[in-house]
Image (spheres, rainbow, N blue to C red):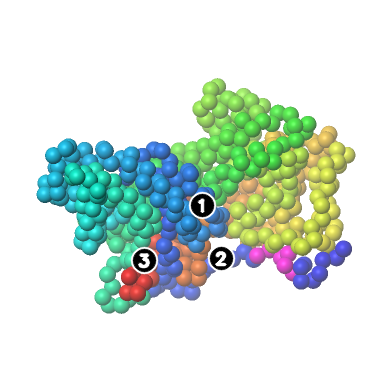
Amino acid sequence: MALPAAALAACEAEPATDIRPPSCAGSTQPGPTPIRRLTRVEYNNTVYQLLGDSSYPANAFPPDEEAAGFDNQAAALVVSPLLAEHYMGAAEELAATHTPALIAQLPNCAGGGANSDSCSGDADAFIRSFGKRAYRRPLTEAEVDGHLALFEQGATLGETDYAPEVGVEMVIQAMLQSPHFLYRVEFGMPNPDGNEVVPLTSYEVASRLSYLLWNTMPDATLFAAADADELRTKAQIEQQARRMMDTPRAREAVKNFHRQWLQLGKIEPLISANGKNPEIYPDFNNGLLPLWRKETEAFIDYAVFEEDASVETLFTADYTMMNQALAEFYGVEGPSGSEFVRVNRDPSKFAGFLTHAGLLALYSKPDRSSPIHRGKFVRETLLCQAPPPPPDIVPEPPSVDESQTTREQFAQHSADPLCEGCHRLMDPIGLGFEHFDGIGRYRETEWGLEIDASGELVETLDINGPYDGVVELATLLGRSEQVKNCVATQWFRFGYGRVETEDDACSIDEINEAFAAADYDIKELIISLTQTDAFRYRRAVSAEEAS
C-alpha cells in the first residue's frame, strides 16, 4: 500500500538547525523568563538544606510532568489541586516535626514562662532569618509584619497559656506553602527608567546558580555574596560557579541531567514492566536493572569529574565502570565486591556509553534488538532532530524468525514506501548496533547467522555517510559539531527550565563558543551556562505583573 504524498512529506526529518544571531554586539537579549516551580528533587533537597529533613516528602507528590525531555520545564510545572493538597500536608508534617528544635533556639520563647512581650523579639528574628532562607531573599517589612501577626495568632489560638510553639509551627506552614518558597520568583533589579531588560538581583542569581548546579537552595557562601551584592558581574558569578562545581552536590546535579537526557531513569520501570524473554535471554533478571543504570551514571561521573572529559570521550572511551556482579554479567574479568570501579574494554567492540547494556536493553524489544528504537534514540537525543510521527497505518513488526537476522527481517522498511520515508532516518543508524543483543551483550552472530552491522547517517549537518558498527558510529558522533551543539542545547533546556527561542540566539552562540574554546569539556560547558544574558537578565516586569 503506497503512502499518500502528504504523509510521505511528513516523514522528512525535522531539519537540523543551528541558531545563529545576526549580531550580538551592544544588545542584551535574555529570552523569556517563566516562573519555575520546584521539582520534586528540588523540593526534597531544599527542605533538607532548610530544615535538615531527610524524609523525602516530595516522593509522595504526583510525578513532575516532562517536557522537552526533562521534568524541570517551567511550562509543565503546574500546581494541580492534588499537588496543592500534598503541599499542605507536607508543610503541616514538616512544621510539626521541626518546630520543637526551632523553638529551642529562641531562648525567650522556649519554656513555660514565655509571654508575648518577651518572645516577640525572638519571633521577629526567627521570621527574618528563616524566611530569608525559605524565600531565598530577605523578607519585606510587610511580609515580616504579616508573619508576626500569624505567629501571635497561633501563640494565642484557643489556649489559656501563651504557646509560641504553635505560632512558630503556623509560620513554618505558611512559608512552606507560599509561592515564594514553592516557586523561584524573579522580578529583577528596580527599574525606575522603564528599561525593557533588567539584570537579576544578586539573590535571584544566587538561586539560579544553586538550582542549576546543586538542585537546591543557596548555601551560606552564596547568601553572603548576595548580601554583599557580589553576584552582579560575570567574573563574580563564575567564581561562585567554579566553587560550586567542586562539590559533591554538583555531581548529583550532573547525574540528574544525564539520567533524564539519556532516559536512564526508565531502565528499571520500563524493562521490569515489559520483561525480557527468558527463553531467549535466560541470564536476564531484574536485579541487573539498577546495575545497568548505575554503570552509565558512574561512568559519566568518573569521566566528567575525574578525567575532565570532553563530549568526544563520553562517546569513545575505552573503559566503563563495573562491580563484580556487572562484570559477571558481561563475562569479563573485573573487580570483586559491590563498588563500581574503572574497567578497560576492547576498543574494537566497545565505545563509551553507547555500548552500555542498560541503554541497549532499554532501546530493545523483549525478544530482540530494535534498530528502530536505537536509531530513534540517536536521531532525537544525540542529534537533536525530532523524528517524524508514524503514519496512521503502521504495519505489524515481523515476529522473531530464527532463520533470519534482524537486519534481514527489517529489510521490509527500506523496500515498502509505507515505511521507507520515515525509517530511513532511524533504521540505518540503529542497524549499526546489531552486534549487541536485546539485553545489551556483545554477540558475533545472531541465531548462528553472520551479523552485518553496517549503517548510514543521512540528513545530518556534518556526518552523513556510511559506517560499520557502533564503534565507528560513536567516533563520528563524538567528533560531530551537530552533536556537540545538541549537548549544549540539552544543557540549556535543563539549566534554564525551558526550550530555546530566537531571543536566545546570542546566549546559545556564547555557550557554543565557550564550549568549543574549552575543547568541549563538560564542566566548562556547565560554567558557560552561568555567563549568558539568558542567565543574568530578564525582561522587565510591569507594575501589574508584579502586583
Q: Report how far apart the C-alphas of labels 1 and 3 lie in the structure.
A: 27 Å
For label 1, the residue is: 64
Q: What amino acid is found at the position of numbered circle 1 in the picture?
A: Asp
Nearest-to-viewer mark from 1 and 3? 1
Determine the residue positioned at 70% across, 61% down.
389
User: Which residue is outermost to the bottom?
Assistant: 194
Judged by depth in the image, the label closer to the viewer, 2 or 3, is 3
In the visual, does 208 lie left or right of 69?
left
Q: Which contiguous range is marked in magenta?
A: 9-14
Q: Main secondary structure of the magenta part?
A: loop
Residue type, mark 3 in image: Tyr
Rendered location of residue 324, percent (x, y): 58, 25
Q: Is residue 44 above or below residue 197?
A: above
Say the numbered circle drawn on residue 537. 3
Residue at the extreme left of the image, as rendered: 117
**Relative to residue 544, is residue 293 depicted above or below?**
above
The tag earlier along the polypeptide, 2 or 3, is 2
Quote the CA–CA distance across marks 2 and 3: 23 Å
Q: Is residue 446 left or right of residue 106?
A: right
Q: Are marks 2 and 3 in contact (CB under 8 Å)?
A: no
Q: Earlier in the sequence, mark 1 or mark 3?
A: 1
| Residue for badge 2 | 18
